[in-house]
Structure formats: structure tokens, C-alpha cells
Image (spheres, rainbow, N blue to C red):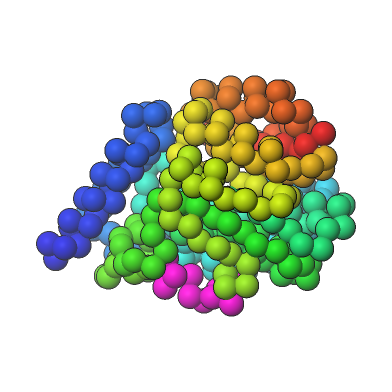
Amino acid sequence: MFRRLLNKFLYNLFLLIDCYQLNRWSVDLINFENTNKNYYIKLYKKIKNNKYPVIDEYENNTGYKINKNWLDNLAFKTQITKKNSPLCYQHGRVLYSSLCSYINKNKIDEIFIIETGTARAFSSLCMAKALEDLGKSGKIITIDKLPHNKSIYWNCYETVTENKTRKQIISKWKKLADKYIIFIQSDSKSILKKIFIPRVNFAFLDACHSSEDIKIEAQYVAAYQKKGDMLVFDDYSMLLFPDLKKSIDLFCIKYKYSMQEIKINEYRSYLLAIKK
């Protein structure tokens, strides 16, 4: 019991130390009392049938839509967490449709993808699903400070009674992960300059939300992108992350990216940036 309480405390402390000083909206202060498996099940049932007409329209425009049952099952294990802010896993739909559309337009056989902020691997697996559904080869290099093969507390259904590794949490999708995803435990600022790939066709940047971090990550990606390549930013919000949004805007202007915002509500928005 003591170890469980300690792990929960350290999980919250990690978030506070890593992100809170950067922006007071960067972390939710989590109340872990009375958390059990039924709690996560109720959360999931409450939100899984929410309507998102903006995302529906985007899927219709691209012509690609992820299988809802597949998405919901993955989200239940990886996206349903106890937090103060509203739960939303619609970025999975945006990433899938955007990547499929990119592949269809560019006719590239091998796709290289960079992601920062792996968390429980939800977004990585959604992108891997797009590659598999379209029969493409490729690799998704995803970076996070949290370990892949070490048992820790993840604030999700799978770790209510015992700590688990990320690998265990996503074991149902093992074949997909093994085929496409490379998990790297590191700070993005430290590791990106050590990674060399011939091209970054597609990227999703969702690590710690400081303007300096996003600048470093986006500039790395831009150096390996060509015309038509895509970069997706999460939490593109003037209300919650004004400095982050301003930094992204300046990056897109300087490095010549077109900008398409997908705004769900005043709190949650994604930006699709395409290299001109």
C-alpha cells in the first residue's frame, strides 16, 4: 500500500517539476482518492459517444476515418485518466485522417515519423494504424522521458491495482507497435540532435508545452521536411497556452508552413502545418 501511494505521489511530482513552472495550465493536480477500475470505466462511458462535428467534417474532407471501435478500445486503455481538465482523445482521429491523406497525396512508399510526448502511446498507435491500413512501410520514432519497459504508475485503468510498463499496457497492439514504433526514453531537446533520418514526412509534437521546447522540436523537423510534408501541433490554444501558440505561429511564418487550425472548443485545438 505504501509503495502504491508513493508511486502516485511521485507521478504527480514528476509532472509538477517537469512542466508546471513553464505554464500554470500545463498540468492537472490530480486527486487520487477512491480511484478504482469502475471509476475509469465510468469516465470512458461518459465521453466515448461525445459528438465532435468539426472532426467529422475534417474526416469527410480527407476521405479517411479511423475505425471507431478500434479507437475507443485503445483510448480506454491509454487515454482515460483522472484529471481536472476535460478528457478528449480526438487527436487520434485527426492524426489518422491527416496521415492517410498525406500518404494518398504524396505517393511515398516508406514513411518516417517523429513524435514527441509518447505518454501511453495512444497517438503513436493511431499513426501506426494509418500506415498499416494503407499498406505502407515506415517507422515512428516517439520520444518521452517516461520509460517503456519499466513498471510505473500511469494513472489509467491498467495500473489501478499494480504498476505496469507501457509495453504491458499496449500489449493488445503489440504486433502493430513492433512493426512500426521505436520508443526512445529521453528529453527531446537532448536526443533530437542525435537522431538522423533521411526525411521527416510527418510529425506530431506534444511534449512539455514551453515555447522554447516547441521551437527546438519544430526546427529539427523542418530541417528534414520537403514540400508537402506535414507537422501537427497539439494544444494550439491562445486561452491555455498563449506563448506556445505564438511560438508556433512565428515558426510557421519563418519556415514557410501553411496553417490549418482544427478547433474543437476554446480549450482544445490542433494545428496542421504543411511545408510550402
Q: Is residue 85 magenta?
A: no
Considering depth in this image, is 16 or 46 the residue closer to the camera?
Answer: 16
Residue at point 80% right, 51% down? 102
Find the magenta span and give its range. 166-176
* Labels in figure, total: 0
Residue at point 62% right, 72% down? 179
4 left or right, relative to 271 = left
Considering depth in this image, is 238 or 124 the residue closer to the camera?
Answer: 124
Q: Up-down: is 143 above or below 171?
A: above
Residue 60 visible in this rendered orientation of the protein: no
105 left or right, relative to 71 = right
Counting from the top left corner in percent of width and height, residue 199 is at 72, 50
Q: Quadrant of the N terminus?
A: bottom left
Residue at point 55% right, 63% down? 182
Residue 274 visible in this rendered orientation of the protein: yes
Counting from the top left corner in percent of width and height, residue 9 is at 21, 50
Q: Up-down: is 151 above or below 175?
A: above
Q: Which residue lies most toward the left here?
A: 2
Q: Could you tell me what secondary structure mostly forms the magenta stretch?
A: helix
Considering depth in this image, is 47 or 162 the residue closer to the camera?
Answer: 162
Counting from the top left corner in percent of width and height, residue 172 is at 52, 76
Q: Is residue 171 magenta?
A: yes
Q: Quadrant of the C terminus?
A: top right
Residue at point 48% right, 40% down? 189
Q: Up-down: is 209 above or below 118?
A: above
246 left or right, relative to 273 = left
